[in-house]
Amino acid sequence: MDLLQEIQRRRTFGIISHPDAGKTTLTEKLLLFGGAIQEAGAVKSNKIKKGATSDFMEIERQRGISVATSVLAFVYKDKKINILDTPGHKDFAEDTFRTLTAVDSVIVVIDVAKGVEEQTEKLVEVCRMRNIPMIVFINKLDREGKDAFDLLDEVEQKLGLKVIPLSFPIGMGYDFKGIYNIWDKKINLFSAGSKTVVSDGIEFDNVNDPELDEMIGSEAAEQLREELELVEEVYPGFDKDAYLKGDLQPVFFGSALNNFGVKELLDCFIDIAPAPLPKMSDTRLVDSKEKKFTGFVFKIHANMDPKHRDRLAFVKIVSGIFKRNTNYLHVKLGKKMKFSSPNAFFAEKKEIVDESFPGDIVGLHDTGNFKIGDTLTEGEILEFKGIPSFSPEHFRYVNNADPMKAKQLAKGLDQLMDEGVAQLFTLDLNGRKVIGTVGALQFEVIQYRLEHEYGAKCSYENVNVHKACWVDAEDENNEEYKEFKRVKQRYLAKDKKGQLVFLADSAFTVQMTQQKYPTVKLHFVSEFN
Ligand code: G4P
């Protein structure tokens, strides 16, 4: 197979949103277009339902589903599309951040009534920092919502984006009549009864045509004309390069539930969204078109069967062709490995594949060799950058609650941390272990999984930590750095990679420490070079 052709036809992206904005519904509609599923309702929601019986049981249920929905692949108009699923729950934000290191672009879903919500802000900020190309989909147009121009302003202001509407709604909620597609100059009329029927739209390149009045009524037609004029005045023309650089974000309006405006989004997406992009490593930029295979692990999923402790490592292929039963170098371990049954993902199934191309994700069975961020190559020594750890929000000492099971506890903690469930810090002074998580829910998950998968018991104890700050010294022999280490000894720890971390007890401490030791930089994120 021709590597270049295969690269050009791939689109690997993630959908991000605040919970309930319509991510699952949109994903499902996209899969319907690809013929990957036959009916609505086939994609199981991996979100944590409100009011579930018990949070961690719900997480177990969700984990089962999320293996299947981690990568949803389908073919549409000869393009191979890979959707990387991201958990919506805020306690799993770190998972989402990591998945975003493996996407080439993103679709942001916003609820027309709620506008920009908290989770969307955080996730978009990460995408913006990495210049990931983004398309915005404003959903639920069948409901009363905010005025389209107000929403576009809100998106620009709260998310720091520069938008360009490529479609525009005709009315909203009760009066919602359809959408004018600025991108391909077509009108799609909405009828609540048409639900999942997909109409190709009516060509309408001149909105001044009196036929429009007949179609949607004079009042709506006049309003649309005025609004489109305003769009032209306020927003610059679409510039694909600016979109690809992350400097301009096209906006579409629609209703995922009614499958309205989704095809337009998808058609534009496959046209403009980037094929697999080059990725920076510690030694050089790796281009997807290079013949030799490289890839990196962005997610690890533990097996659901506690009797078999094997895991699935999700590898994003950056360059070359990944082949089954071929020796590859696990760079960090300096170890050659080959894989007899790599999994590729289709809709909600996975199958063993012989070859995979840049942009694709392969699932490799792992017995404990992989950590998130590990790189595989054909022999070159390089490691991909860009999977940092962020400072957790919640911290607790973890203690062994069953002295007979110390080994199991150590192993369980080690493996759960490899999976990225939480972060472990070991205090320099006394070797005590502190677990840091994004959400309070993870403490329950860890306790539950340690017991059920590793036969170990742990208890927690409060510890007064506000933030984990990764320490970056300009010069390790500098007196200031030495004094910092001496004075702050009680608060210093090592993360899992052995990097030095200052566990600060308050925002004030961070500020004071930074003032007192200006050459010692404190970062809330583990990658800072
Ligand atoms: P999420 O993955 O982003 O969390 O959102 P999800 O797709 O699960 O959608 C959240 C709720 O919003 C669902 O209703 C879904 O049916 C509804 N929804 C999605 N798109 C639209 C739309 O275009 N218009 C309208 N009116 N509603 C939409 P639910 O009642 O919470 O769940 P369900 O019982 O329907 O599954």
Image: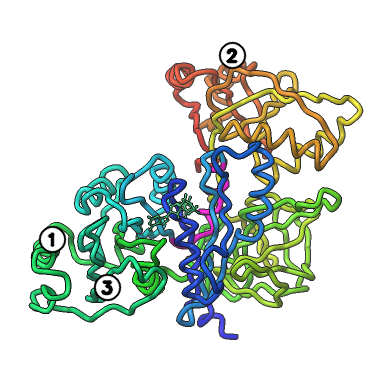
Cα gap from disc 2 to disc 1, whole angstroms: 63 Å
Region rendered in magenta = 92-105
Residue 515, relative to residue 177: is it above or below?
A: above
Instruction: For mark 2, give the secondary structure.
Output: helix
Please state which amino acid type lies under the numbered disc 1.
Glu
Q: Considering only order in the chain, which callout, 3 or 1, is on the residue closer to the N terminus?
A: 3
Asked if residue 106 shows in the view, the reply is: yes
Asked whether 93 falls inside the magenta stretch, the response is yes
State which quadrant residue 402 falls in.
Answer: top right
Query: As drawn, which residue projects farthest toward the front?
Result: 193
Residue 192, relative to residue 162: is it above or below?
A: below
- Is 484 positioned to the left or the right of 148 in the image? right
Tag nearer the camera, 3 or 2: 3
- Is 83 positioned to the left or the right of 236 in the image? right
Cα gap from disc 1 to disc 3, whole angstroms: 17 Å
Residue located beneath label 1 in the image: 227
Residue located beneath label 3 in the image: 188
Identity of the residue drawn at 65% across and 36% down: 54
Identity of the residue drawn at 17% across and 59% down: 235
Q: Position of residue 130 (x, y in %)?
A: 43, 52
- Viewer-closest of 214 and 394: 214
**Quadrant in which the N terminus is drawn:** bottom right
Q: Position of residue 358 (x, y in %)?
A: 56, 71
- Is 303 positioned to the left or the right of 190 in the image? right
Cα gap from disc 3 to disc 2, whole angstroms: 67 Å
Identity of the residue drawn at 58% across and 29% down: 476
Q: Label for residue 487?
A: 2
